[in-house]
Image (cartoon, coloured by chain):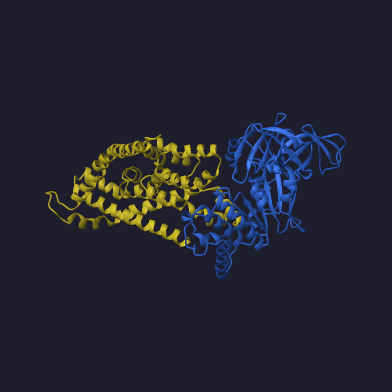
Amino acid sequence: MKNNNSAKTQSEKKRSLSGILLSSPYLVWSVIFIVAPLFFVVYYAFTDRNGNFTFDNISKLGDYTGIFIHSIWIGLISTVICLVIAYPMAYIMARSGARRQKTLMMLVMLPMWMNLLIRTYSWMTLLQDTGIINNLISAIGLPRIHMIDTSFAVVVGMVYNFFPYMILPIYSVMSKIDNNLVEAAQDLGCNKLNVFRKVLFPLSLPGVVSGITMVFVPSVSTFYIAGKLGGPSNLLIGDVVETQFKASNNYNLGSAISLVLMVLILICMAVMNKFADDDTNMIV
Amino acid sequence: MSNVLLQLKNVSVRFDDDQILKSINLDICDKEFVTLLGPSGCGKTTTLRIIGGFVEPDSGEVLFDGKNLLDVPSHKRAVNTIFQKYALFPHLNVYENVAFGLRVKKTPEDVVKKTVKEMLSMVNLKGFERRNISTLSGGQQQRVAIARALAVNPRVLLLDEPLGALDLKLRKDMQVELKNIQKRMGITFIYVTHDQEEALSMSDTVVVMNQGVIQQVGSPEDIYNEPVNAFVADFIGESNILDGVMLEDYKASFSGHVFDCLDKGFDKNEAVDIVVRPEDVDVVEPEKGMLCGTVSSVTFKGVHFEIIVDINGFKWMIQTTDYSPVGANIGLYIEPDAIHVMKKSEYSGAYGDYSSFSDEIDKLSELNDGES
């Protein structure tokens, strides 16, 4: 016990050293896979094929304005649909018994155990003109519906794939809300609706914000889902980037599009966080 | 304490296989400070939650002002609660927390402003309006909770171990403050605690509970001086509880000696429990004492010494300002009014002997009292 002091400083030194050692894999990882790629994206975006500085790539982006808007629009719709389904479900999950919570959680997570490509392919077989859904519809005597290669199919694919990223943060915030707060609100005269409006909803907002972020960002920038389910008329900006890199071999234009997409997403997130902050500030 | 405001009639509650409350009957008067006192798991918090509307009893009636209260949902009851962990709204500042109940009732803004100001000055939190809840100390959060509950002008305030999380000094201050607030507001306080000192110092009426049954209802003096059974005698303060026989009115025999006492109305030679409080025993020379024994331990407590004396194998606790060394032979002198005689009960023999006494055990059981 008497050596405690010196032992402590020693162990603190050790801890800071081991801290650096432990974090070094992540530092190396983030330099190689985050910082360096970002640097190359910026580099390619402002150079031509010969490596000379140019704004041509950026000015060419005007041709893609329609696709940009379409991508953001699809991303928005998918995010809103995810939110509308996930919020009540998260609420129900958070308010039910421990065993039921586990089961529901399992059901939410289950699709994530499968590969994204396989999930998207299965939606193709479901939505095709001669797919499972249409076969069922025609079996009961109704006309077949054209679903594959439409924006609808893209949104379905996005909602299906990104839904867990919406429900998990909302659920985890909601399940941590102290039940005493609900009782306190009732005690002070709130009926069920007011308890939700004045206590549960404002307290669940941080989960909603992170859920929206986690769904909106990938659904704006994803490339595979739209390509498979949306067909050529529903190309999203992510697919254009993919084509530039793989088919056209135009790294410079691809990088420019990526860069602008990144900036647009950052602006969207900043605006939304601002709104969320204002909201809580207004209540406070 | 005349007009009854709240009545519990034959209230029983069962959670799964646990009978929490066994047919409780209790009348609470208007403007009264009532304390529900008992060890953890005795059903005091459940009783409070029934009145607050958070637990529905399996059977029995609760009347408020003569009207059935059980049909009224909690948000419409003229009853407000101070929760054990305060339950302040973390997304609101101090002002909005206090204003919460008023806003729900769509009170005009100027009234809200005036009331919040009044409440905050009553709990000594002027100037804290814009503060964030998380920046407040436990005592300050406690005050906000009190202001929030009182802002909606309840007839009854329910307090569930509100001072449990505060340190001793602050707790003592808050006890006085709560008592003052209750007097000033002129409303009924129903206070739940396992701290008998708190109960005795604040209450008009103390309700002692154990195992879902009300043991005794009375003023703090009654409860302390005239406990009905060994449980109450032991739970409230320290006491030596002995087997005795009531020879006739005003004559009790215990520890091999016949004592004069002030109790009567027992059968001739009825077996009874005798309570003698440690501070009521005088230490005298062995030859002058009614009883004699050997000191087996002495603890200095600041105000007094706590002496454990072995008399014919029964260990007495005595609190005295005179020091006696361990091993000394001392005499005990007991005045007639220091002797309290109780009917035998299911608790007879379970309490009141200090042979296994240790402070540590007391502290451990206090720690375990973190009942919700």
Q: Position of residue A36 (x, y in %)?
A: 22, 44
Q: Quadrant of the C terminus of chain B?
A: top right
Name the quadrant containing residue A30: top left
Residue at x 63% of width, y 60% of height: B180
- The colour with which the image depicts chain A is yellow
Q: Is residue A60 among what the camera can see?
A: yes
Name the quadrant containing residue B124: bottom right
Foreground residue, B257 or B345? B257
> Is B96 left, or right, of B266 in this rendering?
left
Q: Is residue B53 among what the camera can see?
A: no
Q: Position of residue B150 (x, y in %)?
A: 61, 60
Residue at x 42% of width, y 57% of height: A276
Chain letter, colour blue in render: B
Foreground residue, B158 or A68? B158
Residue A47's place in the image compared with B115, above or below, is above
> Is A92 left, or right, of A271 in this rendering?
right
Name the quadrant containing residue A127: top left
> Is B67 left, or right, of A37 in this rendering?
right
Q: Position of residue A225 (x, y in %)?
A: 34, 43
